[in-house]
Amino acid sequence: MNQAVMVSPKTIEEIFVRLNALTDEIKVIKTKLYEKEPSYGSDEWWEWSDKKALKEIQAGKGIKFNTAKEAIKWLNS
């Protein structure tokens, strides 16, 4: 089993970039899998949901509307 394969540095770098991306995706999936959602509609659920929404907004995942017309236009798109 002393076989060696020659690989260019560029290929190795691409492999590491892909491995890092996969590692990040796995972390997100694990977080979602182990996150326990309280019973829907309970007080605990509302608190959990609000915290989750605020984190998403702080991460820049929300959409800001300056007018109701903008919101309606976005909803109809």
Image (cartoon, grey):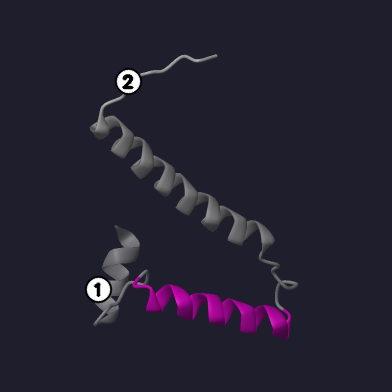
What residue is pinned by disc 1?
70
Residue 44 position within the rendered picture, expressed as x and y whole percent measured from the top left: 71, 82
User: Splitting the image into 4 quarters, where does residue 75 fall?
Assistant: bottom left
Left/right placement of residue 3 relative to residue 29 reads: left
Between the residue at mark 1 and the residue at mark 2, the CA separation in whole angstroms equals 56 Å
Judged from the image, the secondary structure of the residue bearing numbered disc 1 is helix
For badge 2, the amino acid type reads Met
- Considering only vertical position in the picture, is 39 above or below 2? below
For badge 1, the amino acid type reads Glu
Q: Residues within 10 Å of mark 2 (few under 14, many from 20)?
A: few
Which part of the image, by quadrant, shows the C terminus? Answer: bottom left
User: Splitting the image into 4 quarters, where does residue 7 fall?
Assistant: top left
Instruction: Name which residue lies at 46% across and 53% down.
Output: 24
- Between 54 and 72, the residue placed more toward the observer is 54
Residue 66 position within the rendered picture, expressed as x and y whole percent measured from the top left: 24, 82
- Between 33 and 47, the residue placed more toward the observer is 33
Left/right placement of residue 48 relative to residue 15 reads: right
For the record, the magenta segment spans: 42-60
Q: Look at the magenta stretch and give its main secondary structure.
A: helix
The reply to whether the magenta stretch includes residue 59 is yes
Circle number at residue 6: 2
Left/right placement of residue 16 relative to residue 31 reads: left
Which part of the image, by quadrant, shows the N terminus? Answer: top right
